[in-house]
Amino acid sequence: MGWLVSILLAGLLAGVVGVGLVALYHVSATRRIAAKAERLVPPAGRFLDVGGNRIHYVDTGEGPPILFLHGLGAQLLQFRQHLFGELAGHRLIALDRPGSGYSVRARDGRPELTEQARLVARFIEAVGLDRPLLVAHSLGGAVALAVALEHPGAVRGLALLSPLTRFVWPPPPEFAALYVPSPLRRRLLGHTTAIPAALKLAPATLSFLFAPREPDPDFMIAGGGWLGLRPSHFEATVADYTALGVDLPRLQERYGEIAMPVGILFGTADAVLDHRVHGLGMQDRIAGLEVELVDNVGHMTHYGAVAQAAALIGRIAARSGTSGDLAAYLRKGDRVMEGEVKIAPELLHKGETGARKYSPQPVSSDEQDGISRGGTDTGDPKDRPPKAGHGLTEKVDEDPLSTGKSDGTDMPNRT
């Protein structure tokens, strides 16, 4: 009988050792990936303490201020890569939201939208900005809307690019792995399996974000995509996503209180957020809202529709009293109407101010029911870009740094 106990104990010990070795492998791989990310993409700006949060930001140019808020799992370099060069005549400020990029969330900091909005208002005060125009992408759009509701005196207007505006539950399959309520589990995942898995699944992730177009070839370096491959960034991304249900359902019922110029730009091929729900669905919620749709563009409108984004920002800046070289933006916006990226013509009509306005397409009650449940397109799947999952907790079978895919051209960074 003693020999049987010895065999069982030996088997158990071998199992424990095996699990430990696998964990050590993932910890080591994560550290190597994170170190490489920080070598390739060092801090680009300066740092400021705001309520215990160490905020990394860039501040360039002169003129009326525009402040940029990035999306889920992203960072400030996404705006600087292409959009900054289209906005002459303004002071341009972009920050890494707490935990993202090189910003560090305070030890007692919280990821709820209202808390992030409070931090943005405090940042505006600390930097000495005079009611800037707020430009935001994806989840940053939800933060910007929270700023407009909770701190309306801090900003003059909102220009929202592919914004998250409505709470969707249950999470769509592509985002299910990002819903992690336990802070301890977030930390364990962030320092073990999440980063190697994200690296391995990078091509599918980037295709999901940029579809139907190819990912920007300089995205991982100039756009800062490598910075998403670090434990602290993963933890902040998951915390931000998990916290959406705390206050977004309440905030979205208050959009009618917003009394400032607001514009929304969406690509009709967006595979991440449904433009009918988060864009056209906002038309009756905010007075004077301008919604613009662009065909053949997905979620990354600040990459696939740079000229349209700059033109929208210029129009909202003019309406809010923060305009710089507005005429240049409007001329550029008129030119792209006949360029490679087409504005959806059947949706276009002129508003009283001359800004481009769009009317929602008819949606059946069955379609609306499907949209409200999942926030996904209920039309013919052939008409939508393929969707690829984020899969941040899936197993990695080989060293991600020896796969030949670590050259900075196909790594993930959620938005």
Image (cartoon, grey):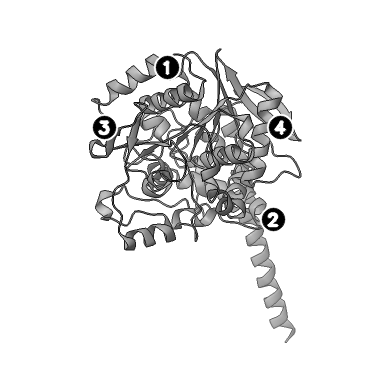
N-terminal-most mark, 2 or 1:
2
Which is nearer the eye, 104 or 366?
Answer: 366
**Which residue is identified by label 2?**
184
- 22 or 376, nearer to the observer: 376
Q: Nearer the viewer, residue 409 or 116?
A: 116
Res 33 visible: no
Gap in angstroms between the C-alphas marked 4 and 1: 34 Å
Disc nearest the viewer among 2 and 1: 1
Q: Earlier in the sequence, mark 2 or mark 3?
A: 2
- Give the amino acid at mark 4: Arg
Q: Residue at x 67, y 61 (%)?
A: 17
- Residue beneath disc 1: 326
- In this image, 243 relative to 344: left or right? right
Residue mark closest to the camera, 2 vs 4:
4
Nearer-N-terminus badge (4/1): 4
Label of residue 342 in the image: 3
Residue holding disc 4: 54
Q: Amino acid at mark 3?
A: Lys
**Quadrant in the picture for the N terminus:** bottom right
